[in-house]
Amino acid sequence: MIGGFPRPERRTVLALVLVAVATVVVSLVALCYGDGWSTPGRVVAGLSGEGPLAGRVLEWRMPRVTAAVVFGLALGLAGALFQNLTRNPLGAPDVIGLDQGAYTGVLLVLTVAGGAHFAAAADNGGGFALGLAGAALAGGLLAAGVVAVLAMGSGYTGYRLIVIGIAVNAVLTALNSWLILRADLEVAMAAASWSAGNLNGTDWSDLVVPLAGIAVLGVGAALLARPVHQLALGDDVAATTGIRLGQLRLLIATVGVGCTAIVAATAGPIVFVALMAPQIGRRLAGTAGIALLPSALTGALLLATADLLAQVVAPVQLPVGVVTGAIGGVYLLWLLFKEVGR
Amino acid sequence: MSRLRTEGLRLGYGERTVVEHLDLTVPDGVFTAIVGPNACGKSTLLRSLVRLLRPEAGSVVLDGRAIAGWRPKAVARELGFLPQGTTTPDGIRVVGLVRRGRYARQPAIGTWTRADDAAVAAALDAAGVADLADRRVSALSGGQRQRVWIAMVLAQETPYLLLDEPTTFLDIAHQYELLRLLRRLVDDGRTVVAVLHDLNQACRFADHVVAMRDGAVVASGAPGEVVDAALVERVFGLACEVLPDPITGTPMIVPHA
């Protein structure tokens, strides 16, 4: 097994299988939902390219469901990485401003690229998507750098970092609103529909770059898994058991921001999945500390479910970020009360 | 014989210098106790020995080479360390925690081997926590928890074991249980270096005492040879009688009323 873990507990394996199965079930249900309900039988036939639904399922619904699952994996992973880095259940990228930072990068490219070029640029596909992803990554890393510099001296694991991150998040959210307000109408409309985090109208051409990027980051995260678990023993013990602390922190932050930025570049900042998934995953799988795989799988289940809800709870399709925001907001309040009470 | 020593070591935190020009030799295969008043630099010294603190000048030398230039995993295969405060991951079980001591022994991509299992089992046995293996660490008593952490360090299979005030949060029975455990580890061939608060315990269990004050070593040697009323007065500023311990014959400090 990669990274040299001993055999996991049976309960952990069982929980991971159940979460994965639940994700598949939710995805299938989501595939049955389009402009109306189609029976699973016809949808499965459509998946294999047969029957009247083949085109609609493969070209329209499948990309969206794939995006929900894979982006959920990425967000769950990012959350687990950052909560390990900060050793704090509040230390998720979406809470400390990294999603908004990545989105700032996206908005800057969109507004600089300009309204007139926007439509043409978006149609040229790959290159533009790569540019957006790069801008999102730069924005996310810059936000992470700002938080790290402001928190310097008090360490990376205290509440000071969280409070600074929340402030940076607020500033960047305001900056993003301002960028949208002063943009050309066409750009502003596109950007605004994105600003809550949205998977509506995702098609395969939108997904090539993000899926490849997340695959690479996933391999990186698998290699980081054991050092990350070692870091949970505290800085002193981690260092004296062979961890290079500075280098590991940089790698964790880079992979974590990478996951966050790719999602933000494609679907906008989808908040609270990275905050919730690690804690839910840990409780379901009964792991010691926050493990990466349960968090990633839980993230996939959360986002797939949220995107399904976004399509069925309201008469109009909601941006998925509204659903995760509604659920996550309640969770954040509960967490804040619990942590303040400690 | 001695593999581990310091050369002209200067340690500090920014502006504040804690230890100035320290040359210390850690004898192999014995129990060394570092004693001294609060803030004398003993924990600082211990942290520099395991490379948690970079010296401002001088070096910590193992086998003739300064450890500052070693790879972290190479240091971790020689020097095991238990800090004063430990961070226990939520929900971790005893065996899971002890397994993490194997980190330095494994390649970046590799499999968990029989050798790893054997080392973990041996560490659990040596620390006397084998029967707790499946318990959650959070459910253990302070004394048990401390022994589990020692098992984690033992799983590293290092010839050196350095501990920063390992008895601090334990009641007196658990303090002695822990010191007996350290003694056994030394008798099995390991080198143990511990910062200890209690002079009587240091004299009873250690082979070698290093007494520090204001960042300098005031005396070092076998307890029976170096610990007397004059030393205690000089190091701690405490007037006392030093009598032979009625059980072990080692020096026993009895402060004046």
Image (cartoon, coloured by chain):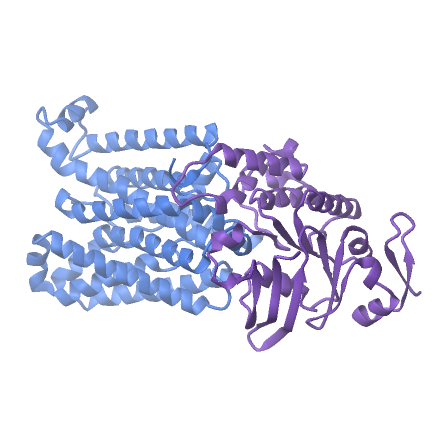
Chain colours: A blue, B purple
**Is A309 left or right of B187, judged from the image as shown?**
left
Question: Which residue ends up furthest to the top in the rendered image?
Answer: A41
**Is A209 left or right of B70, judged from the image as shown?**
left
Q: Quadrant of the rendered structure where residue B234 is?
A: bottom right
x and y, in percent, of residue A112 in the image: 15, 67
Tally the marks.
0
Q: Quadrant of the rendered structure where residue B40 is?
A: bottom right
* Residue B171 sits above or below residue B129 on the image: below
Question: Which residue ends up furthest to the bottom in the rendered image?
Answer: B15
x and y, in percent, of residue A26 in the image: 29, 32
Nearest the eye: B30 or A62: B30
x and y, in percent, of residue A252 in the image: 38, 54
Nearest the eye: B93 or A323: B93
x and y, in percent, of residue A149 in the image: 41, 68
Q: Residue at x 53, y 45 (%)?
A: B89
Q: Residue at x 67, y 68 (%)?
A: B41
* Residue A26 sits above or below residue B12 on the image: above
**Is A188 left or right of B247, judged from the image as shown?**
left
* Residue B3 sits above or below residue B54 on the image: above
Q: Quadrant of the rendered structure where residue A111 is?
A: bottom left
Q: Residue at x 40, y 65 (%)?
A: A147
Q: Is residue B214 visible?
A: yes
